[in-house]
Amino acid sequence: MNLAGYLTEKQMEVYCFDMAYPKIPDPRIHYIQGDFFDDNILRQVTDGMDVVYHAISTINPGNSNEKYMMGYSRDFIQTVKLCAMLQNTHAKLIFLSSGGTVYGCQKHQPICEDAVAAPINHYGNVKLSIENVMRIFDIQAEAKMLIARISNPYGPGQDFTKGVGFVDAVIKKSIRSDVIEIWGNGEIVRDYIYIRDVCKMLYELALYDGPEIIFNVSSGTGCSQNAVIQTVHNITGLDIRFVYKKARSVDVSGIVLDNSKIRSICDMQLLTMEEGIREYLQFLGYVRDAGHVRKREE
């Protein structure tokens, strides 16, 4: 919903397509309830659209090794159908891919878009498979296809209980004094980016009319899980409880993405990790008082 809200601020007419209506709808947005995997409904909702952002995924990095068939048989196949539906229209398709998983283990960092992608989990491979299909449609059918390889966004709207969002988990579990589980030694490095910065970049892709197809959407800066915990502690003053657990085979040790290509079409000042966490805490309704955070009084 962050992207939809940002696009309305840019005076775009926005339609959101999902299985259910939001609990708190935005009056500026048109909501369409339906099933992405229903061909007839999908054809109807995309008809006449200028830009289609595709962000639907039935799996996540943590569960993809168990539920991989859902990714290949549903997400992949239906996205091929979506590409076919749009190939003879004027609509631009922007796919929200995963910069954190499609590249796999890379020796050279930060990673440029032309690096050979070699995902190590099914989530990343499903995303890469979709990307390859989109490239073929772009070449053979002269369709308007763009791929946004988003690193690790955090901020309003994220819910770590759905399987993604380390920063979200650290902030919310710290406030509740819950124990944070870290898979490995905490030195896994990720390229975290505040969600509003992501939205700004995705908006610029809607306006883009150049030859490039793939863009890294990232901060271009790496931060370890241990560093995230330390930053949240410094800002909140909370004693953060965490435990190291056995590393997972689905996790790459380090990912930092080169964002120079997207920055060339989107001149903007990105929030630092500290600035982003402070802004997210403010969104959640917390303020720092006497060295610790507390819920802001209404």
Image: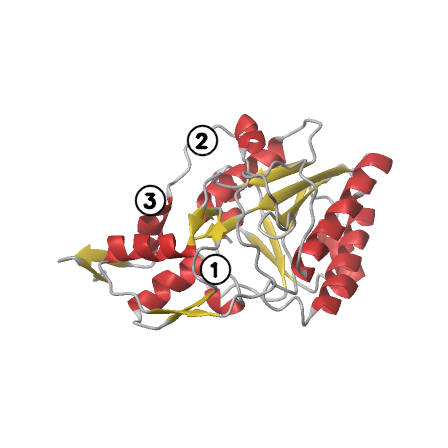
The residue indicated by pointer 2 is: 268
Q: Is 68 situated left or right of 260 in this image?
A: right
202 to 124, vertically: above or below: above
Residue beneath disc 3:
275
Amino acid type assigned to the residue bearing label 2 in the image: Met
Distance from the alpha carbon under mark 2 to that under mark 3: 15 Å
Residue 136, percent from left and from top: 82, 41
Which residue lies at the image location 48% right of the left edge and 28% below the top edge? Answer: 267
What's the residue at 70%, 35% (across, down)? Answer: 213
Q: Earlier in the sequence, mark 1 or mark 3?
A: 1
Query: Is the residue 9 above or below the residue 171 in the image?
Result: above
Q: Nearer the viewer, residue 273 or 108?
A: 108
Along the viewing direction, whichever of 172 and 48 lies nearer the viewer: 172
Badge 1 amino acid = Gly
Please report the residue visible at 38 percent of the width from the left and 56 percent of the height from the top. Answer: 226
* 172 on left or right of 144: left
Q: Which of the two discs, 2 and 1, labels the residue nearer the N terminus? A: 1
**Residue type at numbered disc 3:** Glu
Q: Position of residue 269 (x, y in %)?
A: 41, 32
* Number of disc labels: 3
**Label 2, label 1: how many angstroms apart (C-alpha)?**
24 Å
Tell me if label 2 and label 1 are in contact, CB under 8 Å. no
How many other residues sit within 10 Å of disc 1, few (<14), some (14-19) or many (≥20)? some
Q: Tell me the element at label 1.
A: loop
Residue 222: give x, y in percent of width and height. 46, 44
